[in-house]
């Protein structure tokens, strides 16, 4: 959910869908760096899908926001496709990068709350 919301935010702030997609993947890596507790896989899938659907309803299927949201969560698809045996995305492949920043551990509740705040801010922002 957090990766979708952050990706949607940077996608919406970008001038193009391609730029938003690229930035969203980079933001995924940045969000993996602070110490955090990962959500249960099923919960994460449901929340990510619901967030993508909400962004699609708010902005449309061809919007920069939806493209950013989809690319923001795309690196996590390797967990579903490849399982835990093989990882390609740098913050997944190199365990020392995932949660490497010495921050307070971010709980699932805090991640969901932050995601909802980002979505609310997106909704109130006017498109130019």
Image: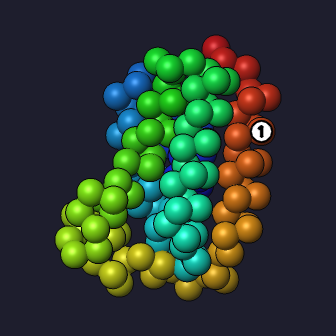
Task: Work out whether 21 lies above or below 105.
Answer: above
**Of the pair 108 and 36, the residue shown nearer to us:** 108
Q: Is residue 24 visible?
A: no
Q: Is residue 89 left or right of residue 121?
A: left
Q: Position of residue 12 (x, y in %)?
A: 56, 29
**Of the pair 3 and 43, the residue shown nearer to us:** 43
Q: Position of residue 104 (x, y in %)?
A: 66, 83
Q: Quadrant of residue 17?
A: top left
Residue at 67% x, 63% y: name it: 111
Task: Work out whether 79 lies above or below 6.
Answer: below
Residue at 33% x, 59% y: name it: 80
Task: Work out whether 53 lies above or below 81.
Answer: above
For label 1, the residue is 120
Q: Position of residue 31 (x, y in %)?
A: 51, 62
Q: Residues within 10 Å of mark 1 (few under 14, many from 20)?
A: few
Element assignment for label 1 = helix
Residue at 28% x, 68% y: name it: 83
Q: Quadrant of residue 122?
A: top right
Q: Position of residue 27 (x, y in %)?
A: 46, 52
Q: Is residue 86 left or right of residue 110?
A: left
**Of the pair 74 and 42, the residue shown nearer to us:** 42
Q: State the scheme by which the image is colored.
A: rainbow
Residue at 58% x, 26% y: name it: 56
Q: Residue furthest front?
A: 42
Q: Is residue 4 visible?
A: yes
Q: Quadrant of residue 43?
A: bottom right
Query: How many numbered callouts?
Result: 1
Quadrant holding the C terminus? top right
Q: Is residue 36 left or right of residue 71?
A: right
Q: Is residue 110 left or right of residue 68?
A: right
Task: Work out whether 82 lies above or below 125.
Answer: below
């Amino acid at each position: 959910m957090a990766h979708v919301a952050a990706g949607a935010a940077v996608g919406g702030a970008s001038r193009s869908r391609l730029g938003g997609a690229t930035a969203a993947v980079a933001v995924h890596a940045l969000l993996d760096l602070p110490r955090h507790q990962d959500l249960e896989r099923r919960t994460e899938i449901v929340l990510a899908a619901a967030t993508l659907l909400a962004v699609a309803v708010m902005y449309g299927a061809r919007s920069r926001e939806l493209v950013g949201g989809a690319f923001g969560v795309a690196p996590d698809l390797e967990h579903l496709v490849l399982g835990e045996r093989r990882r390609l995305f740098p913050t997944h492949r190199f365990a020392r990068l995932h949660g490497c920043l010495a921050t307070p551990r971010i709980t699932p509740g805090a991640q969901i709350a932050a995601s909802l705040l980002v979505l609310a801010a997106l909704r109130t922002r006017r498109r130019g």
